Image: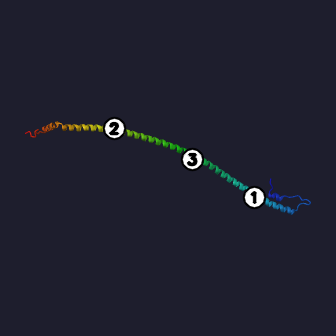
């Protein structure tokens, strides 16, 4: 066990025939007591400071560990978000491609239907033009034909007029 200042103060030395000067020894011991008390106080202050710094170090070590864990969690979360965004992006692209294919197929079907309608209209137009041509030709033929005169006579007789231009009275 280390000496305390009280131990030094209470220390008694045996007296010898020609021993040391008692006042000088006591003065030296008083100086040792003061210095020793100061060393003990400094040691105690240093121990308190070490304890305080150890606590702070522990606190900062905990903060460091927490930050490291937070950083790891943030990195993992960022990776998860990135993976999810990539998956979602791929799904959006697939859906857009599917919609584009559907729109293209619908457009092609409509285009085919319009082409068929156009072909049908062309056929109908051709039939109507042919019929109209035939009608016109028949009318022209009637105009060129002598039957026109007989037809006019017939209409007049039906109306009660004389064919020669006289009234039948």
Label 1 crowd bin: few (<14), some (14–19), many (20+), radius 10 Å: few
Q: Quadrant of residue 102?
A: top left
Q: Is 47 rendered above or below residue 77? A: below
Across and down, in percent, residue 87 comes to 52, 43
Residue 6 is left or right of residue 167, and the answer is right
Residue depicted at x 81% and y 58%:
6
Across and down, in percent, residue 89 comes to 51, 44
Q: Is 100 rendered above or below residue 4? A: above
Q: Return the disc, 2 or 3, that comes first in the chain's sequence.
A: 3
Q: Return the disc, 1 or 2, that comes first in the chain's sequence.
A: 1
Helix, strand or loop at label 3? It is helix
Residue depicted at x 63% and y 49%:
68
Residue depicted at x 44% and y 42%:
100
Helix, strand or loop at label 1? It is helix
| Residue extending furthest toward the left | 169
* In-front residue for pair 115/134: 134
To which residue does mark 3 refer? 78
Q: Return the disc, 3 or 1, that comes first in the chain's sequence.
A: 1
Q: Quadrant of residue 42?
A: bottom right
| Residue extending furthest toward the front | 144
| Mark 3 or mark 1, whichever is nearer to me | 3
Across and down, in percent, residue 164 comes to 10, 39
To which residue does mark 2 refer? 119
To which residue does mark 1 refer? 42
**Alpha-carbon span between mark 3 and mark 1:** 52 Å
């Amino acid at each position: 066990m280390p000496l305390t200042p009280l131990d030094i103060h209470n220390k008694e030395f045996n007296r010898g025939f020609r021993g040391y000067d008692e006042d000088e020894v006591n003065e030296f011991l008083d100086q040792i007591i003061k210095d020793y008390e100061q060393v003990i106080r400094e040691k105690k202050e240093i121990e308190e400071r070490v304890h305080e710094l150890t606590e702070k170090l522990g606190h900062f070590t905990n903060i460091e560990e927490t930050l490291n864990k937070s950083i790891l969690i943030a990195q993992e979360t960022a990776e998860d978000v990135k993976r999810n965004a990539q998956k979602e992006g791929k799904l959006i692209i697939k859906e857009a491609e599917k919609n584009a294919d559907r729109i293209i197929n619908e457009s092609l079907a409509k285009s085919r239907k319009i082409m068929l309608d156009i072909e049908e209209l062309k056929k109908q137009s051709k039939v109507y033009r042919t019929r109209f041509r035939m009608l016109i030709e028949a009318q022209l033929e009637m105009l060129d034909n002598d039957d026109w005169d007989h037809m006019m006579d017939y209409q007049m007789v039906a109306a009660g007029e004389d064919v020669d231009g006289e009234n039948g009275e």
